[in-house]
Image: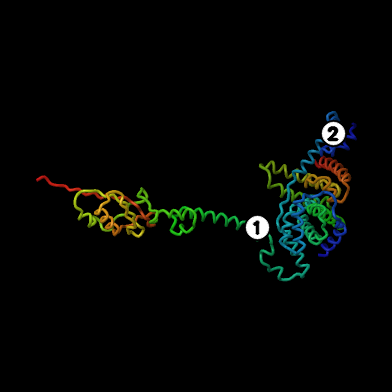
Amino acid sequence: MSKLLKLGAEVSVASGEIALEGAAAAPAVVALEDGLVARCLSGDGFAFSRLVALHEGMVVNLSQRLLGDREEARDLAQDVFLQVFRTLGRFQGRSSLKTWIYRITVNQCRNRQRWWRRRRRDRAVSLEQLNANDEARLASGQGATAFERVARREAAQRVQAALLGLSFDHRSILVLREVEGMRCDEIAATLGVPEGTVKSRLARAREQLRRLLLRHA
Amino acid sequence: MNCSAARARLSEFIDRELAAAESRAVGAHLRECGECARVLRETQDALSLLHELPRQRPTGSVASAVLDRLEVERRGASLQALFRPAWSVRPLIVPSLLHGALVFAVVLSGVLTLDRAVTPRDDSAAARGGWSNKLAPSGTEANPLFPSSNVAVPQLRARGIMPEPFLRWQGEGSVFLETVVARDGSVSAVTLIEGDSEEARALADALRHERFVPARVGGRPVAVSFYRLFSRMEVRGRT
């Protein structure tokens, strides 16, 4: 519990609850989200469950790609939505709710990684190992033939290991762009950095990933 | 354009975000430089691997876990948190069941409506208004059925007894009548069609008191209209 409180404190500082600029959301989506947010703020548990159901998949997926561990990702998703629930009143609707939740997720992942480092958990070893098992589990259910399944599993393990070799900033930009399919302006709004910075980091991240994959191959 | 300049623009080239002139220049360099073309291919392969990463499926358990944590923080841990009804542990279960219940209700009502449409209508159908007010339900006295392969001709309860007026009839002649046998076996209407005479009217009156075994369709008695020809002729033996 003390760990969670500490994390919560770190996150509130890190995320800063700054209203996001740019990345304007579609009016219909904004209206829908406004209604949901208003109901959540009035203490409607069902509305909050609905909000979580809408965004849980993307939070868990993003967390897993950033942390490289499925169980950690699921655990972190709880922290993310706890943070969402507590700070929803400060959400000003200048960006979409989704972008705002992405931002909280990235900040939570960054904090958790720092926490690991302070406890000398070697990310490069432990997480890769954990992740290999996760990827095997995830990828084994797909593909038409056994050969395809094995190939896909190996590719997923290889690319996740390469992702974990990137710096957190580069990894988060690459995952938001290539896995979550966000535009550069949305990533800029999510991370709170200029769009030009996103593009230059994205270029460097792609180049590093290419090199890492060659090394892993 | 040299290799260094092309490599610096490779990311934007992949995203097609370069200006047209720059994009053409990078494209031209990539056609000439095998090394840069290889880097482009390797980068695109790496991005394809990222795109193909399997996605986690949401379990639906996060909301209840978060609400639990909030509840525990608000009230402190208690036995109430352990013994709760299922819908408070998973609040989305009830609304998700509502959708299923709605579909079930629609299908059930459709089935019942279709099932009702094939059963014979009763008298109460006349009270429903519309065209049914003008035309009585078929099989009733006001709109009787006619004998067919499905509808048998009602049989007289007392067989072989000719009506008394017919027996007292003098001379030759024919009477053609329509008889409507009601659902209780009584005669609800007798209409003279041909052969109007004093004797024929007396015969029609007598026929109104006949009793029949009512015809049945699908186990239910129905009113039936049928035609009868009474013909009398005198046959004289040769002396």
Q: Is residue B68 visible?
A: yes
Residue found at x 68% / y 45%:
A142
Residue found at x 68% / y 47%:
A141
Q: Give the labeled residue for mark 2.
A: B20
In percent of width and height, residue B157 lies at 28, 58
Judge from the rendering whether residue A164 lies leftward or rightward of residue B179; answer left or right: right
Residue found at x 85% / y 37%:
B18
Residue type at numbered disc 1: Ser
- Mark linked to residue B96: 1
Residue found at x 46% / y 56%:
B133
Name the residue at the top extreme.
Answer: B32
Whichever of callouts 1 and 2 sits on the residue coming sooner in the sequence is 2
Q: Element at badge 2?
A: helix
Task: Write down the chain letter for disc 2.
Answer: B
Residue type at numbered disc 2: Ala
Front of the two marks 1 and 2: 2
Q: Is residue A126 visible?
A: no
Nearer the observer, A151 or A56: A56
> CA gap, disc 1 to disc 2?
51 Å
Task: Write down the chain letter for disc 1.
Answer: B
Up/down of A148 relative to B84, above or below: above
The colour style of the image is rainbow
- Mark linked to residue A37: none
Up/down of A4 relative to B191, above or below: below
Q: Quadrant of residue B39?
A: top right
